[in-house]
Image: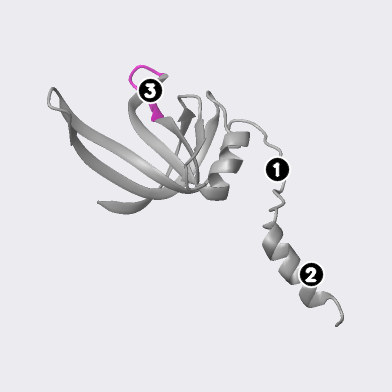
């Protein structure tokens, strides 16, 4: 199953950043998403059930997430939802994962400062483009 979804919640684990042998940056963390509602009978706010997601970001989004997101912060994630069944022989269950297309702080809960990332070009590409601009 693969659907597009947007979820807001709390970063529940310290984001883990790694770069594969092929040079692919990956950042992942667990997200806890629970909705509060006002119980008129009790005249107070109560927490609903918590849904748990594994969030994974790739490439530049992974690099930016690793430098921006910390455990305990409120974020909004948009991406592809994947629900997978698993069985390790002793136990079985489901995992709910989101491959992030976009993520950022949920400024309903606080403020955030944006810093634009300047992408660094590969040296080979820079040399080629510079030679095209130089007069013959």
**In front here: 27 or 75?**
27
Between marks 2 and 3 in the image, the one whose residue lies nearer the viewer: 2
Q: CA distance from mark 1 to mark 2?
A: 31 Å
Q: Magenta part mainly helix, strand or loop?
A: strand
Say which label, 3 or 1, has the lower sequence index: 3
Q: Residue furthest left?
A: 89
Q: In terms of image quadrants, where is residue 86?
A: top left
Say which label, 1 or 2, has the lower sequence index: 1
**In front here: 66 or 9?**
66
Check disc 3: other Cα within 10 Å, few if <14, some if 14-19, many if 20+: few
Q: CA distance from mark 2 to mark 3?
A: 58 Å
Residue hosting label 3:
47
Q: CA distance from mark 3 to mark 1?
A: 31 Å
List x then y, in percent, for residue 102: 51, 49
Residue hosting label 1:
114
Check disc 1: other Cα within 10 Å, few if <14, some if 14-19, many if 20+: few
For numbered disc 2, what is the local secondary structure? helix
Q: In terms of image quadrants, where is residue 34?
A: top left
Name the residue located 71 percent from the left edge and 48 percent from the top edge.
Answer: 116
Q: Is residue 39 magenta?
A: yes
Q: In terms of image quadrants, where is residue 42?
A: top left
List x then y, in percent, for residue 10: 48, 29
Q: Residue furthest bottom?
A: 136
Residue hosting label 2:
130
Q: Residue furthest front?
A: 136
Mark 3–mark 1 CB contact (< 8 Å): no
Query: Where 128 sits versus 80, above or below?
Result: below
For numbered disc 3, what is the local secondary structure? strand
Query: Where 101 sits versus 113, above or below?
Result: below
Check disc 2: other Cα within 10 Å, few if <14, some if 14-19, many if 20+: few
Report the span colored magenta: 33-43
Q: Is residue 85 left or right of residue 109?
A: left
């Amino acid at each position: 199953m693969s659907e597009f979804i947007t979820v807001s919640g709390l970063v529940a684990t310290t984001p883990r950043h790694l770069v594969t042998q092929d040079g692919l940056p990956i950042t992942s963390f667990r997200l806890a998403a629970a909705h509060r509602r006002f119980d008129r009978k009790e005249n107070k706010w109560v927490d609903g059930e918590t849904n748990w997601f594994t969030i994974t970001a790739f490439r530049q989004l992974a690099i930016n997430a690793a430098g921006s997101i910390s455990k305990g912060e409120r974020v909004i994630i948009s991406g592809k939802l994947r629900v997978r069944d698993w069985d390790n022989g002793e136990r079985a269950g489901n995992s709910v994962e989101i491959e992030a297309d976009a993520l950022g702080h949920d400024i309903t809960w606080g403020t955030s400062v944006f810093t634009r990332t300047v992408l660094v070009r590969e040296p080979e590409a820079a040399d080629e483009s510079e030679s095209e601009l130089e007069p013959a």
